[in-house]
Image (tube, coloured by chain):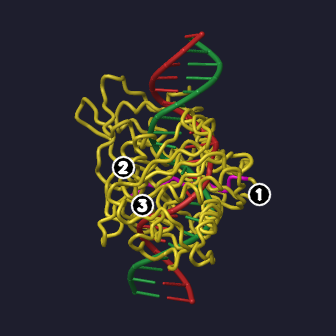
Chain colours: A yellow, B red, C green
Amino acid sequence: MKGEYKIPPKSVSNLTNPKVLADRLKELVGVKFILSGKTRTDGSNARKLIEKTLGKYDLPEKCPKCEYEVVPPRGKGIPKITREFIDTYIVTTGKSYNLQVWNRIPASKTLLIKYESGKSLYCNDVRFVFVRIIPSKKVIASIIILTDDYIETKFGKFGKPTFKHQLLISSKVREKIYKSETRVLSYDDTKKLSYLITHKYKPPNLPMVQEPEFEKLYSIELLNEMVAKKLIGQKLYFGATKNRGQALERLVLNLLGYETNKKSLLYGAFPDIRNQLLEVKVQDSPTVDLGKFSPEVEEIVIEENNLTTFDVRYLIALTNEKTGIIEGIILAPGEKLGDAFSYVSDKSYKCQRAIPMNYFEKYAGLSIFNPD
DNA sequence: TACACGAAGGCACCACCTCC
DNA sequence: GGAGGTGGTGCCTTCGTGTA
């Protein structure tokens, strides 16, 4: 059955009526669902459970390959259970659930599947299946199937698309860095920065959130000596998500002689250490999240000197996922990142819509479609 | 101050490619 | 054709910021 769900239905009219879907999924209400704590795993398990349950019934007839075309490049934004045009989401904790729709504009008439017959499946044909799980009871409390039109009418429009750039550092490159003598891969600053940087260390006289000053930017060479080399072998202590980046930022700031109060650490602008035009990242999986800004595209970061994402220096700490120990460092201007590593092409975007948790709680024990 | 929206952050899954 | 590796996707949670 694997892969079967990826094939679109023969036509729009073949899709199972959502009320019928709700009936079919009713058997999952009250069923045990143990959260692994790994969100991607849990999301995937929920989807598999939905697939397995729907697989007990006839799926919509599949479309022969020659009769349809997947419109978005590489199928980005196509609902995962394509045959039923369903995306699944797990709803667990929190006061409100932040629904994120990736790589398509929900409730829009944007084409996803185009049929030879002339008919099509659009973004607003996708059905959203929410699996509400109560973590403390380890049980599925409800299944709620919604359409994006319903979501917008009931809770308001989806937010504007927000973009996320990512960079991939392959395990090969990683290994190469680990095996190198210094375990630091560094590149020179951009030409534009050459007249702004200094190779001599003088303690900073401005807070790290201030814009950089002429000739007070430490050169990459200096950053290498003062920071990179000293970071190798250090352990990053972190607890919940997000704290790891901050732990590294704190280490870097200490090594450079900046004050590290909580407020400054929480200053979440780009680049992290603005006074040094330095962005700090931690990486143990192959993916580095660059966030909204990416040096793949040149964008002005500091107007005064016309400094761009190309000039921003990236310090990427490669850590051992088990121990948290920094085993390698990449220190490069944005301009050079693309030379050594690969950008995820076609940046991804998401549209978000918060749904209050009490909405889901209202329907405990039910499996329903677009309730009033 | 509270709330909503936008963004950051983390990383597991999975499709696809390569090699045997 | 199957195992193993690699490249990408996008799911989920939490946080920061703007606005009323």
Residue at mark 1: chain: A
Which comes sooner in the sequence, label 2 or label 1? 1
Report the residue at 72% width, 48% height from top: A36
Task: Judge left or right: residue A289 versus residue A123.
Answer: right
Residue A310 among magenta residues = no
Question: Which quadrant, please, contains the N terminus of chain A?
Answer: top right
Please tell me which residue lies in front, A295 or A358.
Answer: A295
Dominant SS of magenta comes to: strand
Mark identifier at residue A137: 1
- Whichever of labels 2 and 3 marks the residue nearer the N terminus, that label is 3
Q: Amino acid at mark 1?
A: Lys
Q: How many marks?
A: 3
* Span shown in magenta: A139-149
Using the image as rendered, state which of residue A310 and residue A224 is in the foreground: A224
Q: Position of residue A251 (x, y in %)?
A: 64, 64
Badge 1 element: loop
The residue sitting at the left extreme is A118
The location of residue A365, given as percent across then percent down, is: 66, 57
| 10 Å crowding of disc 2: few (<14), some (14-19), many (20+) | many
Which residue corresponds to mark 2?
Answer: A296
* Amino acid at the residue labelled 2: Glu
Mark-to-mark CA distance, 1 and 3: 29 Å
Q: Position of residue A85 (x, y in %)?
A: 43, 41
Q: Nearer the viewer, mark 1 or mark 3?
A: 1
* Dot placed on the residue nearer the N-terminal end, 1 or 3: 1
Residue B14, quarter of the rendered image: top right
Q: Are marks 1 and 3 in contact (CB under 8 Å)?
A: no
Regarding mark 2 in the picture, which secondary structure is present there?
loop
Using the rendered image, report if marks 2 and 3 lie on a common chain: yes
Residue A150, which numbered label? 3
